[in-house]
């Protein structure tokens, strides 16, 4: 009898334990449901708040644009323009077909604290450029939308500066130097000289190797035509070709550099420009401004032979024993900017790079009405960024009245 009662007590205890476990499980389920419900409610509140803030900011931004758009752009009240910076710029040298959307947003003078891509510059602020190009009342000062630290666009037809940025500061011209090398050499040559041969020496190749120069690819002992030296100087930026030209014309690079500086004086640039070599190797005494470089490029484009060389996309040198098929030369800048929307056409160009100069370039362009411009930039953080600075400047500021 006692054993039976003991079994009943154990059964009853087991039943109570099972009931307690079910109650605990139920309490846990209710707690979890309450937690999930709370999370859902908080998420819903945050979504509503974020949506409300986004709508308010959008309305405020639209309101600022409407106000700015209502401000008239007069000759006495400087206006400002903000350009969206390029996004996700493709750095690959194989593919750079990215389309740009150079959108500008007008802002009022009250928002002067914001970053600006360009702003109108008064003639009273910059009365004299110190060059053959002069400021006009609506000359624009370029801002952070242009990545090069120095930049200028000039209208060669009217000798005016359309847009600029640190245009009067000294720069290291790097291989843009070779535009003056080309011009100086061509002015010393006769038509019959172009087919004359020049022998590449070990001293020339050693000079290029020691100074880590870019070369056209001529070999020691190779007999190269003077015409090939001209194209080799510009298209692949060949130091071997540039020194060959200097020695053919003057007997030595040192004597040729004297002619280069004489040309600077003739162009009225000797106060702000001075060159020590014909290649563009860095030297403290080798300098100019981007306005000087624009003037040099304009003078070069006024010479038919120089214009043909600077405008060539590709060129194949004459065949010889060292190169039975010739050497195919290519203008890197022109071939990579020709499919970009500049609002016109870039007709000629010369790039440059040394560590002290960054990536730089000078280009000659024309708009759809055949008006002519020169763009010069210096100290860009990359070769493609240099190209896109030219694209943006041409597209934004050419075609202006």
Image (cartoon, grey):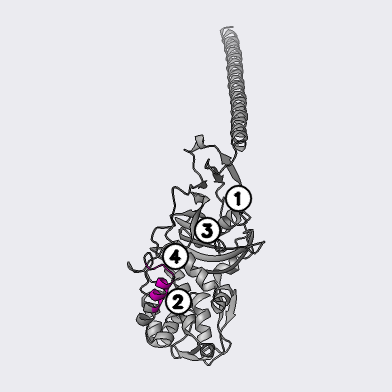
Report which residue position mark 2 lands on.
181
- The circle drawn on residue 102 is 1
In three-dimensional space, the C-alpha distance between marks 4 and 3, rounded to whole angstroms, equals 14 Å
Report which residue position mark 4 lands on.
292
Of labels 4 and 3, earlier in sequence is 3
Which mark's residue is nearer the viewer, 4 or 3? 3
User: Residue 171 in the image: x percent, y percent?
Assistant: 40, 62
Which mark's residue is nearer the viewer, 1 or 2? 2
In three-dimensional space, the C-alpha distance between marks 2 and 4, rounded to whole angstroms, equals 14 Å
Q: Is residue 207 magenta?
A: no
Element under disc 3: strand
Which mark's residue is nearer the viewer, 1 or 3? 3
Q: Which residues are magenta?
A: 259-270
Looking at the picture, does residue 264 appear above or below residue 12? Answer: below
The answer to whether the residue labelled 2 contacts the one labelled 4, judged by CB atoms less than 8 Å apart, is no
Picture residue at 45% right of the left edge, 83% below the top: 245
């Amino acid at each position: 009898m006692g054993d039976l009662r003991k079994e009943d007590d154990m059964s009853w205890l087991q039943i109570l334990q099972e009931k307690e476990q079910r109650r605990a499980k139920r309490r846990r389920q209710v707690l979890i449901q309450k937690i999930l419900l709370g999370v859902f409610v908080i998420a819903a509140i945050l979504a509503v708040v974020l949506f409300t803030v986004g709508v308010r900011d959008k309305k405020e931004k639209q309101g600022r644009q409407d106000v700015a758009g209502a401000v008239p752009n007069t000759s006495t009240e400087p206006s400002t323009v903000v350009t969206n910076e390029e996004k996700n710029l493709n750095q690959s040298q194989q593919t750079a077909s990215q389309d740009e959307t150079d959108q500008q947003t007008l802002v009022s003078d009250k928002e002067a604290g914001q970053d600006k891509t360009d702003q109108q510059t008064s003639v009273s602020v910059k009365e004299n450029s110190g060059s053959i190009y002069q400021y006009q009342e609506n000359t624009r000062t370029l801002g952070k939308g242009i990545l090069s630290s120095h930049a200028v666009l000039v209208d060669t037809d009217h000798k005016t500066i359309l847009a600029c940025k640190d245009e009067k500061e000294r720069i290291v011209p790097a291989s843009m130097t070779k535009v003056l090398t080309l011009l100086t050499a061509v002015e010393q040559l006769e038509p019959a000289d172009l087919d004359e041969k020049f022998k590449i020496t070990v001293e020339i190749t050693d000079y290029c190797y020691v100074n880590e120069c870019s070369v056209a690819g001529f070999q020691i002992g190779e007999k190269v035509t003077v015409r090939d030296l001209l194209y080799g100087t510009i298209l692949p930026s060949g130091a071997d070709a540039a020194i060959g030209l200097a020695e053919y014309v003057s007997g030595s690079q040192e004597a040729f550099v004297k002619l280069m500086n004489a040309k600077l004086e003739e162009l009225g640039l000797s106060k702000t420009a001075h060159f020590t070599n014909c290649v563009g190797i860095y030297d403290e005494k080798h300098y100019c401004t981007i306005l000087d470089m624009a003037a040099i490029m304009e003078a070069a484009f006024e010479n038919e032979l120089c214009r043909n060389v600077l405008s060539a996309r590709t060129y194949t040198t004459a065949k010889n024993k060292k190169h039975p098929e010739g050497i195919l030369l290519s203008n890197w800048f022109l071939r990579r900017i020709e499919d970009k929307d500049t609002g016109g056409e870039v007709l000629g160009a010369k790039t440059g790079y040394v560590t002290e100069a960054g990536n730089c370039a000078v280009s000659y362009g024309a708009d759809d009405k055949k008006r002519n411009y020169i763009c010069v930039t210096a100290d860009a953080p990359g070769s493609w960024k240099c190209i896109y600075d030219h694209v943006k400047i041409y597209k934004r500021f050419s075609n202006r009245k």
